Amino acid sequence: MTVRHIGLEECRQLADGFSKPYHANYFAMYSSLFGGVVTHPFLMMVPVDDHMVHRGDGVFETFKCVDGCVYALDRHLDRLERSSRALHLALPASRSEITEITIATIRTSAVRDCLIRLFVSRGPGGFTVNPYECPATQLYLVTTTLHVPTEEEYARGVSIKCSSVPPKKPYFANVKSCNYLQNTLMKKEAVDAGVDYTISLDEQGFVGEGASENIAIVTQDGVLKLPSFGRILKGTTVSRAVEMLEEPGARGRVQAISLEDITLTDAYNSREVLIFGTSFDVIAAVRFDGQSVGSGKPGPVFQFLHERFESDVRQNSAMQTPVYDR
């Protein structure tokens, strides 16, 4: 076997034939290393010596742009700042600069709907575990295809099962870090089992969270119960859903809202099980560990929240950051 040495000139030639089918889902990438936005997939790279790559030493946020407006950007940046502080990671740009970078990257993508992935890394500089070998933190932002369920899929609901993957300890569960090994294994477990999502259980057997989703149940007496956020990541979507259910116009949708431990028996016997995530907002789980949930169909609390999110994402100016002039 002959291993060739590839120089810069040959890299330019390789770039021409670099296209892969999945690259169609990538629109543009901002890199603080480059100091700008690139659109060629060959350039959408992170250095292998970046601590985010070989140590998971970084934080990230995922949010979406719908019809030319970024939804809940401020809330995602709030959480980005909290996660960064937990890792003693200095943000390489101010909030206003990150907002400008986000808007510019979406505009370069020339799309009105996309999913945005924002990464803040410790930066390149070496391969040990020592974070001080990295001279400066870096910011990478990628726009990709936004995949949203069809109305038929929302109406059908999804299936979930308990995960065998141990959950993160509370400190790390509350940091949206780039170390997502447990989350990845949970998703692999779901795909291998032929279900849509898996849900973690803590050491006491209480319901936790999905690979990248929050879960809530509606009890038979109409109480919305959510696992305590002390041991799981507090999602921006589920937090917004709670606010919606506390609005005057939502009175009677649920009898109360409670943060407390949820047993598997609670979940199996619930009226509804709700899954919350950035791309799809809310979807109903109609089967849990092979058992039918409630009537076996998405329930009224799901229907209410689904309609409210549709309106909130597209019409609530307080939650929107415009990308294009209207």
Image: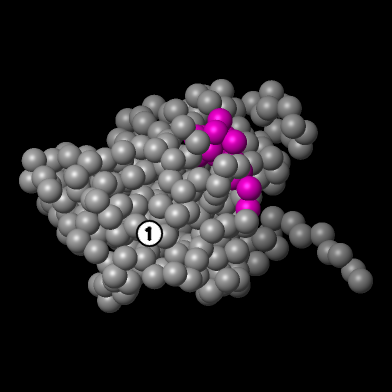
Residue at the image position 64 percent from the left and 26 percent from the top? 135
- Asked whether residue 38 is in view, the answer is no
Expressed as whole percent of the image width and height from the top left, the position of residue 27 reads 42, 60
The residue that appears at 12% across and 48% down in the rendered structure is: 252
What span is in magenta? 165-179
Q: Residue at x 58, y 71 (%)?
A: 193
Quarter occupied by residue 110:
bottom left
The one nearer the camera, 92 or 168, is 168
Residue 280 in picture, x, y percent from top left: 33, 59
Within the magenta stretch, is there residue 177?
A: yes
Where the N terminus falls, by quadrant? bottom right
Mark 1 Cα shell of 10 Å, populated few (<14), some (14-19), many (≥20)? some
Position in image of residue 158 (x %, y %): 39, 68
Q: Residue furthest left?
A: 249
- Location of mark 1 (residue): 269
Camera-side residue of 31 and 183? 183
Whether 301 is among the magenta residues is: no
Residue 190 visible (yes or no): yes
Q: Is residue 325 left or right of residue 58?
A: left
Q: Residue at x 63, y 48 (%)?
A: 166
Going by the numbered disc 1, the residue's amino acid type is Asn
The answer to whether 4 appears left or right of 19 in the picture is right
